[in-house]
Image (cartoon, rainbow, N blue to C red):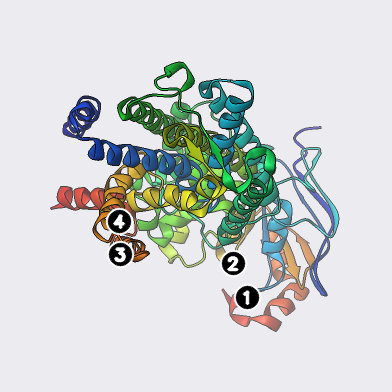
Amino acid sequence: MVARLALLLVAAALVALPPLLPKYALEVLISIMFFGYLGACWNILGGYGGQFSFGHAAFFGLGAYTSTLLFLHWGITPWLGMLAGGVLAAAFGLFAGYLSFRYGLRGPYFSLVTLAFAEMLRVVAVNWKAVGSSLGLVVPNRGSAPALFLFAEKLPYYYVIFTMVVGALLITRAMERARMGYALAAIRENEDAAEAAGVDALSTKLAAMALSSFLTALGGTFYAQYFAYIDPSLTFGTAISIGGLLPAIVGGAGTVAGPLLGSFVLTPISELTRAVLRGRAGADIMLYGLVLILVISFLPNGLVGWIRGRRAAGVRA
Amino acid sequence: MTATGLEVRGLTKRFGGLVAVSRFNLTVAPGEIVGLIGPNGAGKTTVFHLVAGFYPPTEGSIIFEGTSLVGLKPHAICRLGLARTFQLVQPFAGLTTLENVMVGAFNRAPDVAEARRRAAEIVEFVGLGPRRDVPARHLTLPDRKRLEVARGLATEPRLLLLDEVMSGLNPTEIEAIIGLIRRIHARGVSLLIIEHVMRAILALSHRLVVLHHGEKIADGPPASVARDPVVIEAYLGESGEAAAR
């Protein structure tokens, strides 16, 4: 009851307060939502299914490039383009997933294969003139054109990514409570035992892969529209893959709220270290790494796991 | 072609040069309890892995209720009504007892509410009611053994393969598991049981099959198999203690 009320208050604040925020704070909040969204998408396969993808940038990049190319060449609004990107990414996810899962690649091997797929797409994009090669693509500035997913101010972008986060979390929650949530958790805990109990591990993992990659691709379109510029290393690079995986793991993999909570902690740290250590290239990343090591050492089950542990201890006391 | 039970013919499994199971024949009729015994390393668990689809056989046929199981994946075999437990218990450690059993119940239940209802019934049935909402990682070994049985039972099999569900239990706990297996049988489930606890297997089985070095050396009523000189030789040759039990 108290938890539900607190959740409602936080949600209300996230809707009502942003118009009052200074520009920089709003940008940070958009970043928080953006990485929270990527984390929520990654969490579906990685957190619930235990299949740690290191290559979600593949889906992100496919989304960013598909909607942007459709817009540049045929004037198709990115609102539709993002769905096309999502479908393409899901198809690629099914292809990559089938190859990996069919041949029994588990654990670190699966992670490496996904990383390789993302790198492969990055190299293709770098060398392909028709998609802008390493120069990338610029999304033209048309001022405020909501029908084309273009806004003059930051605020509308905030509400778009906020809606996307809420959508991803609601989908996650519905999945968690459905048959698929149980099947994924069983696979994560013990794949052989899951099969023995009647869980079709291959189909279940592929379904999670398709859903996760579809949603990740939508994030790619958001990125392209928000920054108005994409290139191969920004969209297919490891920074995006890691940027989705970390908030989920730090916040609590396999929990609904974990990825967003993780992003609320990690993204400001990342922004802060970058601001404080400006001019000392790489120092911010080292400090960020240190924070990560500490979090993972002391909160192995993420923030949500830690909170649940404290709450359980409180009940017992 | 239903209700013909399990029929295994000429089953052979080679791992490189090692022959783990050789031209093994086995039937389990509907309603039957068959004990599969033999010294350690005889190939009993390999037979389970082959029947349940975890290894492909090198040769031979496995027919369950008229359907060939060769080449099917474990989940498909489970869906046909043949479930197994693992010798080394394999709980979903992060899930609660009830959730573990629900995963099995989804095999037949049409929705989540029904899966939860059926799983709750089975959790009570195996005597884990008080441990229902405890994460499986906190269960004791005897409870994990029961959970293993419950998860298999929740898939609503017509044939259940039990792999040493009594190992590591004390005499009281063994008595309780014998009672549980009898009640499972009374639900109309046929059973194929691997067990080292001779007293239990003699009490439960309608028929005993003995494996030694991957080959069947005896198949018949428990009392006569237990007196079979070839069987006694096999056990005394490897471990006199097992035969004495």
* Foreground residue among B227 and B78: B78
Instruction: Say whether residue B154 is visible.
Output: no
Question: Which chain does tag 2 point to?
Answer: B
Q: Amino acid at mark 2?
A: Met
The residue tagged 3 is A287
Residue lying at the far left in this picture: please name it: A317
Question: Is there one chain holding both mark 3 and mark 1?
Answer: no
* Foreground residue among B87 and A257: A257
Q: Residue A115 placed where, x, y %? A: 58, 55
Marks 4/2: CA distance?
A: 69 Å
A71 on left or right of A182 = right
Find residue A274 and name its label.
4
Q: Is residue A310 above or below residue B87?
A: above
Q: Is residue B109 above or below residue A231?
A: above
Tell me, yes or no, whether the two marked residues, 2 and 1, touch with CB atoms within 8 Å: yes
Question: Is there one chain holding both mark 3 and mark 4?
Answer: yes
| CA neighbours of label 4 inside 10 A, class few (<14), some (14 to 19), many (20+) | some
Find residue B198 and name its label.
2
A146 on left or right of B5 = left
Q: Amino acid at mark 1?
A: Ala
Find residue A206 and name its label.
none
Q: Residue A17 placed where, x, y %? A: 19, 28
Q: Secondary structure at mark 4?
A: helix
Question: Is there one chain holding both mark 3 and mark 2?
Answer: no
| CA neighbours of label 2 inside 10 A, class few (<14), some (14 to 19), many (20+) | some
Q: Nearer the viewer, mark 3 or mark 1?
A: 3
A140 on left or right of A90 = left
The residue tagged 1 is B243
Marks 1/4: CA distance?
A: 72 Å
Question: Is there one chain holding both mark 1 and mark 4?
Answer: no
